[in-house]
Image: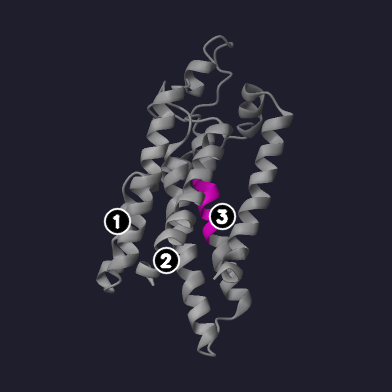
């Protein structure tokens, strides 16, 4: 199982190291402007709607296993969402960090890139709940695929390695894109989505390790 999941885990570790490098190299506000240096109408529309996936569509997708009688998979996601969500909300209210819209108030007007029609929030920026939701969902899917891949390998019917690895990398890319959407929309700083992604990655891994016998 560890070997099957390693593609996703290693790719996430590389991405995390890159993000931590950016956070170490650039001041918080300068980094936010750097990551928002290019805005287009197409990107504005795409990231606006893509970010919304973490608000309710992902929860609908999480219910789909019920149609296939995979009740445990939906329960697993629910446990991960509730457990990680509790940690995330505790951190939000403990730190109560200002959102970019507030942090940039002392800067000249127009410096903060915003997208028309977006309701800008002002508080509880750290960590990002949307980034957490994207990562917890995709990581749960990756763990399930890793388990299925291992089962097929043991049966002598392994999934093509390039197809399996590509699917895991696609899941990670979708999660990372969702996290970046929050920075693009100036709803969060990179540090916010970074920690949100860590909680979203660690929680499913920990829950799977603790309750693996019941899940499989």
Q: Nearer the viewer, mark 3 or mark 2?
A: 2
Which SS class for mark 3?
helix
Q: Residue at x 42, y 37 (%)?
A: 88
Q: Residue at x 48, y 33 (%)?
A: 127
Q: Which quarter of the image is occupied by the C terminus?
A: bottom left
- Where's residue 185, x and y in %? 49, 33
Q: Earlier in the sequence, mark 1 or mark 3?
A: 1
* Residue 173 disc label: 3
Task: Let me know if residue 120 appears in the view.
Answer: no
User: In the shown orientation, is residue 134 left or right of residue 9?
Assistant: left
Q: Earlier in the sequence, mark 1 or mark 2?
A: 1
Label 3 CA crowd tier, 10 Å (few <14, some 14–19, many 20+):
some
- Between the C-alphas of marks 1 and 2, the distance is 24 Å
User: In the shown orientation, is residue 43 left or right of residue 214?
Assistant: right
Tell me, yes or no, whether the highlighted magenta stretch contains residue 185.
no
Label total for image = 3
Toward the bottom, the furthest residue is 156
* Residue 212 disc label: 2
- Between the C-alphas of marks 3 and 2, the distance is 26 Å
Q: Which residue is mark 1?
A: 60
- Where's residue 26, x and y in %? 71, 27
Q: Residue at x 55, y 81 (%)?
A: 159
Which SS class for mark 2?
helix
Using the image, determine if residue 189 lies above or below residue 9. above
- Where's residue 38, x and y in %? 62, 35
- Where's residue 178, x and y in %? 49, 46
Residue segment shown in magenta: 171-178
Q: Residue at x 51, y 23 (%)?
A: 100
Which SS class for mark 1?
helix
Using the image, determine if residue 122 lies above or below residue 197. above
User: In the shown orientation, is residue 27 left or right of residue 214?
Assistant: right
């Amino acid at each position: 199982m560890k070997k099957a999941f390693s593609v996703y885990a290693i790719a996430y570790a590389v991405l995390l190291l890159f993000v931590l490098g950016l956070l170490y190299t650039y001041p918080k506000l300068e980094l936010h402007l750097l990551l928002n240096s290019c805005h287009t109408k197409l990107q504005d529309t795409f990231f606006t709607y893509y970010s919304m996936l973490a608000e309710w569509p992902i929860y609908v997708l999480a219910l789909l296993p019920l149609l296939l009688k995979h009740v445990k998979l939906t329960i697993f996601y629910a446990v991960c969402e509730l457990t990680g969500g509790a940690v995330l909300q505790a951190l939000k209210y403990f730190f109560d960090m200002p959102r970019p819209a507030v942090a940039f108030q002392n800067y000249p007007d127009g410096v903060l890139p915003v997208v028309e029609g977006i309701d800008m929030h002002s508080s509880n920026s750290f960590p990002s709940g949307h980034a957490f939701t994207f990562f917890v969902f995709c990581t749960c899917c990756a763990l399930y695929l890793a388990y299925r891949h291992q089962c097929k390998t043991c049966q002598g019917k392994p999934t093509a390695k390039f197809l399996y690895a590509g699917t895991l990398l696609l899941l990670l890319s979708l999660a990372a894109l969702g996290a970046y959407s929050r920075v693009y929309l100036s709803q969060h700083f990179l540090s916010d989505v970074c920690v949100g992604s860590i909680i979203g990655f660690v929680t499913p891994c920990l829950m799977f390790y603790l309750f693996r016998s019941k899940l499989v």
